Image (spheres, grey):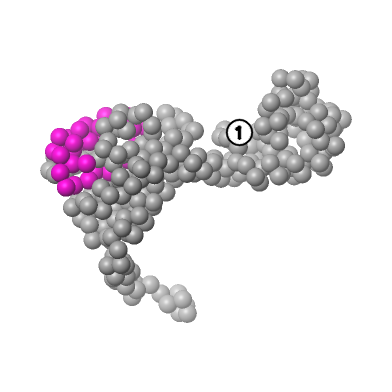
Amino acid sequence: MLDRIRGQLETLSSAERKVAELVLEQPYTVIQAAVADIARNAGVSQPTVIRFCRTVGCSGLPDFKLKLAGSLVTGVPYVHSSVRPEDPTSEIVAKVFDNTVSALLKCRNDVNPQAIEAAVQLLTDAHRIEFYGLGNSGIIAADAQHKFFRFGIPTVAYSDTHIQMMAASVLGPEDVLVAISSSGRTMELLEAVDVAISAGAKVIALTTSGSPLARRATVSLIADTLEDNETYSPMISRIVHLVQIDILAVSVALRRGPGLIRQLEKTKHSLKNRRLDNRQPE
């Protein structure tokens, strides 16, 4: 339904186009609104709302709402990518969820299994793994280190540029650096990657396609998302990178075999006495 409306925008009358634009901007609100509310928010008359519904192939407003709801359930449109100051809370909630789900589905469909396999093999064979990220990506690096150190592999995460440069210089051919950057163009991170490569280390990049970081890396895991990283702190790419880290962690754990299960059980058991019993009052 949303695709149909976008396709008919140029052929609609000026009044009906106002209704169409309201539907595209706030579809969840329109589904729950009465005809009078839709007309008021679009700045048109109530008959115009009904005419619009018939123009897009529906018998009336109830039929239009039913088809619109079905469209939102079966597909996650990129039309929700722009959150507006005047959006009600219901629209903001829907748009943030839809943006994230849409990005994850796109990443799943675009994933390169060969690149994942190559990255997993490098991590499985590594004597030491280091995760580098700056700013928002530094948080992802810390999350990755939290997962991988439990596998019994020497693992660290660095978000300080000076430490990254020094640490990269002492890496060797059996070590792996995982560099995380939504833009792939941060100069300090690229310099640390160059140092690591010169030292003989392998580099896995979590970044965007065609970026300088992607071109430098031994293996690149791509996350192309529709968000303005130049103006806003990356949110969608952060979620995608976290999922990519989970994929690598699960794959490496499976690759290392049953012995790792005992290792993970030891780490969980070490925290057992640090938690309150569910049956005890706090």
Whether residue 229 is visible here, answered yes or no, is yes
Q: Which residues are magenta?
A: 173-202
Q: Residue at x 13, y 38 (%)?
A: 199
Whether residue 36 is visible here, answered yes or no, is no
Quadrant of the image for the N terminus? top right
Foreground pick, 85 / 60: 60
Is 249 in the magenta? no
Question: On screen, 245 above or below 27?
Answer: below
Foreground pick, 194 / 113: 113
**Callout 1 secondary element:** helix
Q: Residues within 10 Å of mark 1 (few under 14, many from 20)?
A: some
* Image x and y of residue 53, in percent: 81, 33
Foreground pick, 174 / 144: 174
* Image x and y of residue 121, in percent: 28, 49
Q: Quadrant of residue 223?
A: top left
In the rendered structure, which amino acid carries the disc numbered 1?
A: Val
For mark 1, what is the residue?
Answer: 79
Q: Residue at x 27, y 67 (%)?
A: 259
Left or right, 109 with reference to 53: left
Q: Quadrant of residue 195?
A: top left
